[in-house]
Image: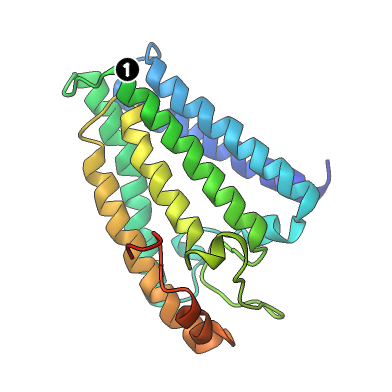
Amino acid sequence: MDDLARRAYAKLARFQITLAVLIFLPAWSLAYWQGWLVWTLFLVCCVAITQYFLVHDRALIERRMESGPGAEREPRQKLIQTFSSVLVVAIFLVSALDHGRGWSSVPLAAVLIGAALIVLGFAVMFLAFRDNSFAASIIQVDRGQKVIDTGLYARVRHPMYSGALIMFAGIPLAMASWWGLVPAALLAAAIVWRLTDEERFLARNLAGYDAYRGRVSARLVPGVW
């Protein structure tokens, strides 16, 4: 295993440990099969995506190693990312607390729909990453970067965010929580805030982006917005 793979898998291991704490500590139980379902889905999907791009697009992995508010270079994005990070944590915390306290009664069908949404969200993000090697975790324009208008980017301008919205909508359901949908809805608003600010940055700094916006009108959902 080379240095990039070690760093990528070390980061993934830290994430999965943190995720386990966020799921099982607030629930105060390991007998939480919905929590194990979500944790396992994240593990399988993240390992599969990481391994694929370690083989097929190592530059993408390198670009995505830096993440979070501290890595952002634009002051407004630091604020947006801080707000978004708090909401991501809140989705897991509230959902796990909901389960532990018995606030919600979520049928099995809804849990399975939530699990399917998590997998679908990861699949959409995977396709976005495969189409666009410049899809870094932070807002930036790299040397040699060009506008991508093929694959999912021919339909929507921000397919990675579309996938994230699907995934985060599925997490509370898969964790058997209705209350977790509240921070998920707030996170959706934060993602919209992030992408609109990102578009202003790209219009200023990425040649051809304005013309691309003219060709592809949908930001997240074809025919809707």
Quadrant of the drawing holding the N terminus: top right
Q: Label 1 crowding class (10 Å Cα cut-off): few <14, some 14-19, many 20+?
A: few
Question: In the depicted view, which residue is nearer to us: 41 or 159?
Answer: 159
Instruction: Point out residue 141 in the picture as x, y percentages from the top left corner.
Output: 60, 77
Residue drawn at x 65%, y 43% is 49
The residue at 28%/31% (across/down) is: 95
Nearer to us in this view, 37 or 116 = 116
Q: Tell me if I can see residue 132 in this picture.
A: yes
Q: Is residue 200 above or below residue 164?
A: below
Where is residue 157? Give x, y as percent.
Answer: 48, 68
Furthest residue in direction front, as rendered: 223
47 in relation to 154, above or below: above
Q: Can residue 65 be seen in this view?
A: no
Rendered image quadrant of residue 117? top left
Q: Is residue 115 left or right of residue 211?
A: left
Q: Quadrant of residue 96?
A: top left
**Which three-letter amino acid code belongs to the residue tagged 1?**
Leu
Question: What residue do we see at 31% from left, 34% from top?
Answer: 172
Q: Is mark 1 on a helix, strand or loop?
A: helix
| Side (left or right) of 120 relative to 81 | right
Along the line of sight, the residue nearer the viewer: 22 or 151: 151
Residue 17: x percent and y percent? 52, 32
114 over 208 or under it: above or below: above
| Quadrant (top left, top right, bottom left, bottom right) of the C terminus | bottom left
Task: Please tell me which residue lies in front, 208 or 7.
Answer: 208
Residue carrying label 1:
108
- Rendering colour mode: rainbow
| Furthest residue toward top | 31
- Picture quadrant where residue 161 is located: bottom left
Residue at the spot 50% in from the left edge and 57% down from the top edge: 160
Against 79, residue 105 (above or below) is above
Q: Where is residue 112 in the image (x, y as percent from the top left)?
A: 39, 24
